Amino acid sequence: MFEHLVIFKFNAAITPEHEQELLNKLLALKGVIPGIVDLSAGMNVTEETDNRHGYSLGLRVTFENQDALRAYGPHPAHQDFVQALGGVLENVVVVDYPVT
C-alpha cells in the first residue's frame, strides 16, 4: 500500500463555501477512483497555530499500490478537483510513501 498526504494552503480569495466544495470533492474521490483503500480529509482546526497563516485543508489517501497512486493524478475526478483550486491555492505540500 501507499500513503498520499497533502496539505493545502488557501489564499484570502477563498470563501467558506468554496472550502466546503473542495472538501466535498475530495471526500467523493473514494467512491470514484479505483485503487483507493481509504481516504480522509478535513479543514484544519488546530489551536496550535493561527489558521490565517497556516495550512487550511489536509488529505490522506491510502492506495492499494503504487500503480493506483500513479493512476490517481490523471483521473478525471482528481483533475476536476485540481481545476476547482484555480485562483485560491497559495501552497501545497505532498508526501507519498510506501506502507510496510
Image (tube, rainbow, N blue to C red):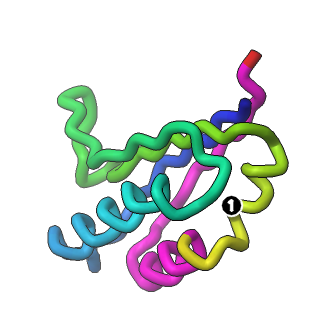
Query: What residue is at 52 percent from the left and 61 percent from the top?
Result: 91
Nearest the viewer among 57 and 78 is 78
Query: In terms of secondary structure, where does tag 1 sit?
Result: helix
Report the residue that reaches farthest toward the right.
67
In-front residue for pair 99/82: 99
Verify whether residue 83 appears in magenta: yes
Q: To which quarter of the image does residue 77 belong?
A: bottom right
75 in relation to 57, above or below: below
* Residue drawn at point x = 51 percent, y = 83 percent: 83
Point out the image quarter for the C terminus: top right
Label total for image: 1
Q: Indicate the position of residue 68 as horizontal and vertical percent values.
A: 75, 50
Q: Magenta stretch containing residue 31, yes or no?
A: no
- Segment colored magenta: 78-99
Query: Quadrant of residue 87 in the image?
Result: bottom left
Q: Residues within 10 Å of mark 1 (few under 14, many from 20)?
A: some
Q: Position of residue 65 (x, y in %)?
A: 78, 39
Q: Amino acid at mark 1?
A: Tyr
Q: Is residue 43 above or below residue 49?
A: below
Question: Whole-percent x and y of residue 64?
Answer: 71, 38
Which residue does the numbered mark 1 point to in the structure image? 72
Q: Nearer the viewer, residue 53 or 62?
A: 62
Residue sitting farthest toward the top: 100
Along the viewing direction, whichever of 43 and 27 lies nearer the viewer: 27
Quarter containing the N terminus:
top right
Name the residue located 70 percent from the left edge and 65 percent from the top edge: 73
